[in-house]
Each structure stands twice: as C-alpha cells, then as structure tokens.
Image (cartoon, rainbow, N blue to C red):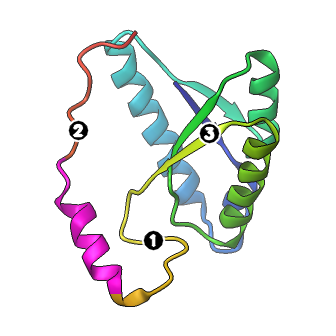
Amino acid sequence: MLVYHRTQPLAAADAATQHYQFLRESLLDLDAALRKRGGGLRIEVGEAVDVLERLWQESTFSALYSHQETGNWPSFQRDLAVQRLCRSHSLKWHEFAQFGVVRRLQNRNVWQANWEALMAKPCLDPPTALG
C-alpha cells in the first residue's frame, strides 16, 4: 500500500501545523494496523505527480486508487495534474467518494439525495490479512 504526502496543499494559507500532525499520526496508526495484517505503508514525500511518476518508472502499474478529496484550490489543482499524468500513462484512476461533497455536480438540487445514498452505504470491514 502506498500513501504519499503532498507538500503544496499543506503549505497553503488555509493549512495549519495541526493538519500535518494529524496526517502524520493517522499514517503511523494505519501503518501499525497494516503491519498486524502482514502489510505496511510506503510513505513518499513530495509533489503528488512527481512521486507518482517516480513510482511508475520504478514499476509500471495500470491503476491508481484514491479517495476523492474535499480540499482547497491547491489540492484541486493537484488532482487535475494527477488526472493528466494518468491519461499520459493510460492509467485508470479510481476515486472513491468519502464525504458529501460531489465534484462536477451539475445540479445542486440532487446533492442531499446523493449524500444520503453515500452515508447509507455500509462500511467495509478491515481485512484480517493482506497479500
């Protein structure tokens, strides 16, 4: 499993040290939980596109999986850059919704129904083992 730390959104004016500290603590907790199941995290530091390009050069992969982030303008710009990278390498990018914000929503009148449907979905149980 891979998690990368993107520097630009955390350096934005609306980010604080607490955001970085929470991210760091969350990654350490996730790594510990994954190690109990035979896995672990590989944490990369840098701009998302640079990190993904370097990883793709190390070992080509055909798909990228992530959650759909609700973030600030720099994080949205980063996502557009990741989208361009995926297209250039013919990578399938699977973004999973995590909150009530729906990107590219053409009609806000359907937002509540979308949110209720997402919130009604059951949570997945964590795997007992990896690999």
- Disc on the earlier residue, 3 or 1: 3
Q: Helix or strand or loop: what does disc 1 sit on? A: loop
Q: Quadrant of residue 50?
A: top right
- In percent of the image, x 39 and y 32: which residue is there? 29
Judge left or right: residue 120 versus residue 47.
Answer: left
**Is residue 26 shown in magenta?**
no
* Direction from residue 80 to residue 126 in the image, left or right: left
Name the residue tied to disc 2. 124
> Which residue: 68% across, 31% down?
44
Query: Quick one: label 2 or label 3, which is nearer the N terminus?
Result: 3
Q: Which residue lies most toward the bottom here?
A: 109
Circles 3, 1 touching at the beta carbon (< 8 Å): no
The answer to whether residue 54 is left or right of residue 122 is right
In this rendered view, identify the residue nearer to me: 9 or 80: 80
Q: CA distance from mark 3 to mark 1?
A: 20 Å
Q: Which mark is residue 38?
A: none
Q: Amino acid at mark 3?
A: Lys
- Can you identify the residue that label 3 sits on? 92
Q: Which label lies toward us, 3 or 1?
A: 3
The residue shown at (45%, 87%) is: 107
User: Is 126 situated above or below 25?
Assistant: above
- Identify residue type, mark 2: Leu
